[in-house]
């Protein structure tokens, strides 16, 4: 009986974490370059791996023959490219393919798909609240938003003077990327050259689909409510059983 209570409790905790992930996706549904996350619930995944990878039937445990404690094994990020939207802003950029812009911060270089850049007070190309945008020769100084750009990320004044080139890198294993705030990533992995076209006057939308996320949220909320209701039944049954115990026995 108590095993069932533990299983239900773990289910409540798991769905609570799942809702947190979904809520973050929904909050960033309009954040440029945002990559949505998914919370992986371990019991089904682990059992599936066991049953498909183990040919010895005698070693298998039939599904449902033992209580399983659910738990979130991992939060995975979907790096699928979002749709593009034309903004006509001379400081907006999007990556058509795999890769990341490089941003200089006080704690080192971070990486993002968000090309919604501005100019800081000194005239450097800047990603708001994060840091200066890095070019192939360091932070990119523009001094003006009256610029032009090509698909290699080279930036020019309106009369053709060269200003710099956006640094865009990629990574062999995205599993080594760590998401920080919103759409920014950190990693200790070595970067490689990105093979990508850079769209100018364009932004990449978030790949978090609001309808899909709402559907997932409703399913998770139903699972959470069901677990909470059954937990109350367990609690009532436990109270009744304890009330029948003779303390003098």
Image: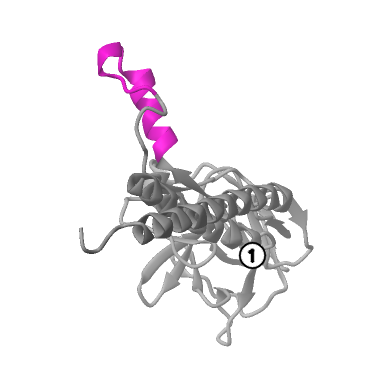
Q: Give yes or no for residue 197 being in the magenta stretch.
A: no
Whether 120 is drawn above or below 5: the answer is below
Identify which residue, 238 or 202, lies in the foreground.
Answer: 238
Q: Is residue 173 above or below residue 45?
A: below
Q: How was this image coloured?
A: one colour
Residue 172 % position (x, y): 39, 41
Which of 73/158 is in front? 73
Q: Looking at the image, which is closer to me, 19 or 204?
A: 19
Instruction: Say which residue appears at 58% left-offset and 87% top-offset.
Output: 121
Is 50 covered by the magenta stretch? yes
| Residue 80 showing in the rendered view | yes
Is 215 left or right of 2, judged from the image as shown? right
Rendering coords of residue 215 (x, y %):
69, 48
The C terminus appears in which quarter of the rendering?
A: bottom left
Residue at point 54% right, 46% down?
79
Q: Is residue 211 above or below residue 140?
A: above
Q: Is residue 13 left or right of residue 249?
A: right
The residue furthest left is 249
Query: Would residue 48 appear left or right of 147 to someone viewing this image?
Result: left
Viewport quadrant of the N terminus: top left
Q: Which residues are magenta?
A: 43-62
SS label for mark 1 = helix
| Residue 56 in view | no
Residue matched to label 1: 27
Q: Residues within 10 Å of mark 1 (few under 14, many from 20)?
A: few
Q: Main secondary structure of the magenta part?
A: helix
């Amino acid at each position: 009986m108590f095993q069932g209570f533990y299983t239900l409790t773990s289910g409540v905790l798991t769905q609570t974490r799942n809702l947190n992930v979904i809520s973050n996706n929904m909050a960033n549904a309009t954040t440029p370059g945002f990559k949505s996350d998914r919370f992986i619930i371990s019991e089904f995944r682990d059992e599936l791996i066991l049953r498909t990878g183990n040919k010895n039937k005698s070693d298998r445990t039939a599904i449902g023959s033992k209580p399983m404690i659910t738990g979130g094994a991992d939060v995975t990020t979907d790096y699928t490219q979002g749709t593009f939207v034309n903004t006509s802003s001379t400081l907006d950029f999007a990556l058509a393919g795999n890769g990341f812009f490089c941003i200089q911060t006080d704690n080192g270089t971070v990486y993002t798909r968000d090309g919604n850049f501005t100019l800081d007070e000194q005239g450097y190309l800047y990603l708001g609240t994060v840091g200066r945008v890095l070019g192939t020769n360091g932070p990119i100084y523009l001094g003006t938003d009256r610029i032009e750009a090509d698909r290699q990320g080279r930036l020019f004044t309106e009369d053709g003077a060269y200003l710099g080139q956006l640094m865009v890198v990629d990574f062999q294993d995205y599993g080594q990327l760590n998401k920080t705030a919103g759409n920014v990533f950190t990693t200790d992995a070595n970067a490689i050259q990105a093979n990508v076209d850079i769209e100018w006057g364009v932004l990449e939308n978030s790949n978090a689909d609001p309808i899909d996320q709402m559907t997932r949220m409703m399913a998770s909320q139903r699972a959470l409510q069901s677990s909470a209701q059954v937990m109350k039944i367990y609690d009532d049954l436990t109270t009744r059983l304890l009330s029948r115990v003779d303390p003098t026995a």
